[in-house]
Amino acid sequence: MAIISTRPSVRLVKTRWRKKGPRTLADRAGVIGANIWKISLEIFKHMEKDGFRFGSDRLVTDVISEFIAFLVQVVDRKVYGKLSEADRASLINAVAAHLATTMENNQLDLLGPGDYRAPFIRLLNERFGDYAGFEYPGGEPGYPCVRFFATRVSDAMAGSDNRWVVEQMMDIEAPEMVRLMGKLVSETADSAPL
């Protein structure tokens, strides 16, 4: 029998602007990227607290990369139809660039010198292709999409003995991630014209 914890909602989404005035696409992308990074780290910490073992720093970054890829594509789906295609593409590219820089800086600190940006961008592009085939009934990722995500996380954690990863992702983490992305998009991309 799986022991899957429940927890209060992650309250990480920070979208209050320090200064008044219009927000550029780059401003919004930076806020979205920073929040995706925070949410990904919080999900990792929650899973670690619940007894999931990550074994190595490399495995941690692989799992966090899967979280990020899922969250970026959720943002893309949530802004679809709300922004022009050009603005949507610019926003998602800027979010991905922000996250690639953040991931690269963290991996340089954690793992030492190496090429971390290109593999991360390659993963994002590959996952965007994978996720493109799934339907989003009512604007939310359907069961097959969430199952695919959970399986990718489980595959990334294959080097450790972690039963119940798929169930944890599907039942606990993914729904919270999607909820937070909905809030994030409504408070940044939807809040005012770009």
Image: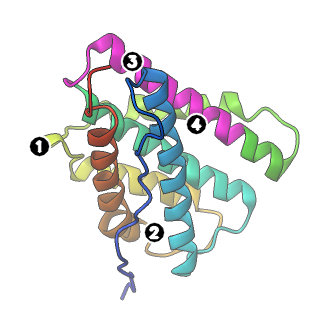
Do residues under tags 3 and 1 come within 8 Å of each other at their CB atoms? Answer: no
Between tags 2 and 1, which lies in front?
Answer: 1
Q: Residue at x 57, y 52 (%)?
A: 64
Which residue type carries mark 2? Val
Quadrant of res 103: top right
Rendered location of residue 47, percent (x, y): 51, 72
Instruction: Name the disc covering residue 188, or none.
Output: none
Q: Which residue is mark 2?
A: 165
Give the SS element for disc 2: helix
Q: Is residue 159 above or below residue 182?
A: below
Q: Which residue is mark 1?
A: 138
Give the SS element for disc 4: helix
In magenta stretch: residue 91: yes
Between tags 2 and 4, which lies in front?
Answer: 4
- Relative placement, left or right, of 191 versus 5 is left
Give the CA separation, mark 2 to mark 1: 26 Å
Q: Which residue is mark 3?
A: 89
Rendered location of residue 130, percent (x, y): 39, 34
Do residues under tags 2 and 4 come within 8 Å of each other at their CB atoms? Answer: no
Which callout, 2 or 1, points at the residue further toward the start of the chain?
1
Give the CA separation, mark 2 to mark 4: 24 Å
Give the CA separation, mark 4 to mark 1: 27 Å
Which residue type carries mark 4? Leu
Q: Is residue 83 above or below residue 102?
A: above
Which callout, 4 or 3, points at the residue further toward the start of the chain?
3
Which residue type carries mark 1? Gly
Specify the segment rendered in magenta: 81-104
Pick whichever, 170 or 73, lies toward us: 73
Q: Which residue is mark 4?
A: 99
Which residue type carries mark 3? Ala
Which callout, 2 or 4, points at the residue further toward the start of the chain?
4
